[in-house]
Amino acid sequence: MKVYALDEGSYSVGVDKKFIPFDPKTDDKKDRKGSLFINVQPFLVELEDELIVIDSGLGFAHDGKMVIHENIRKLGYEPEDVTLVLMSHLHQDHASGMVDTETGSLSFPNAEYVIQRTEWEEAYSNTKSSYKTEIFDTLQRSGHIHFVEGDGQLNSAISYELSGAHSPFHQVFHIVSEGQHLFYGGDEWPEPEQALRRFAAKYDYDGHKAMELREQYATQAAEENWTCLFYHADENAIAKIAKKEDSFRILPITN
């Protein structure tokens, strides 16, 4: 099993929920007062019989080519090779890349998109700008959605859990293959450093539940030697976690 971070870059996010590219080397945060600054890191996982994208990014393009597509090609694959797209939830920074923003077609035309049914229903009924329903319309017409409900096993390697802390129907994924255990916590554990302190975030649907889940996940990761994937990591997007007494340590993994 191989795993890669598909770094889509850094962005500032204002109160209007618009994501604006931000280059930490040349741009000044002072020019974007009141904004949050985040990184976007979808993932590519290669199994013996599957090529998997985990969350699809913002779908940004340069010179008519989607960033996530170009990142996949740099690794020696094509977007058409992807067989599964695992979606933790459908907020725009995770789900906009499900559709090719340049062509209006599916970004991964040969893949099944694995989505919690209740998250899909919530996204369509929710009027918040966090969701882009025009993306969902294209996906719905494609016939490539694989709805799941609650907790379950997708196949012999992949399982999912309805966690419901960042959004009401958020899910996390475990991929166990070839003696390795990958864990993806989506936006309930988006940065490895969040395991180092207890806090309840206002941006979570249930901040206290997300806090408890992070501690649970980090403890299990340390005890069971999980490799963890962090979608909004500044660095260390792929890492292991170690625990000593009452504290955790981040152990980076590089490809």
Image (cartoon, rainbow, N blue to C red):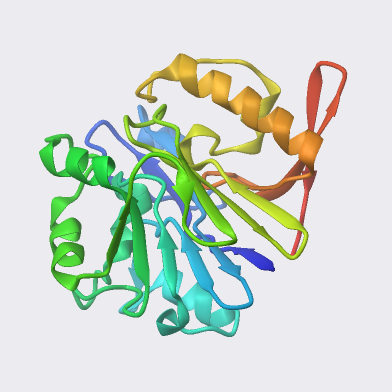
Residue 147 in which image quadrant: bottom left
The one nearer the camera, 235 or 77, is 77
Residue at the far right in the pictured view: 244
The picture places residue 252, in percent across and down from the top left corner, at 77, 48
Q: Is residue 250 visible?
A: no
Residue 13 in which image quadrant: top left
Q: Is residue 35 above or below residue 87?
A: above
Q: Who's the residue at 59% across and 85% down the image?
A: 76
Badge count? 0
Compared across the picture, whether 236 is left or right of 209 comes to right
The picture places residue 38, in percent across and down from the top left corner, at 47, 42
The one nearer the camera, 137 or 64, is 137
Q: Who's the residue at 27% across and 72% down the image?
A: 100
Q: Is residue 118 above or below residue 146?
A: above
Q: Is residue 65 above or below residue 209?
A: below
Compared across the picture, whether 28 is left or right of 133 comes to right
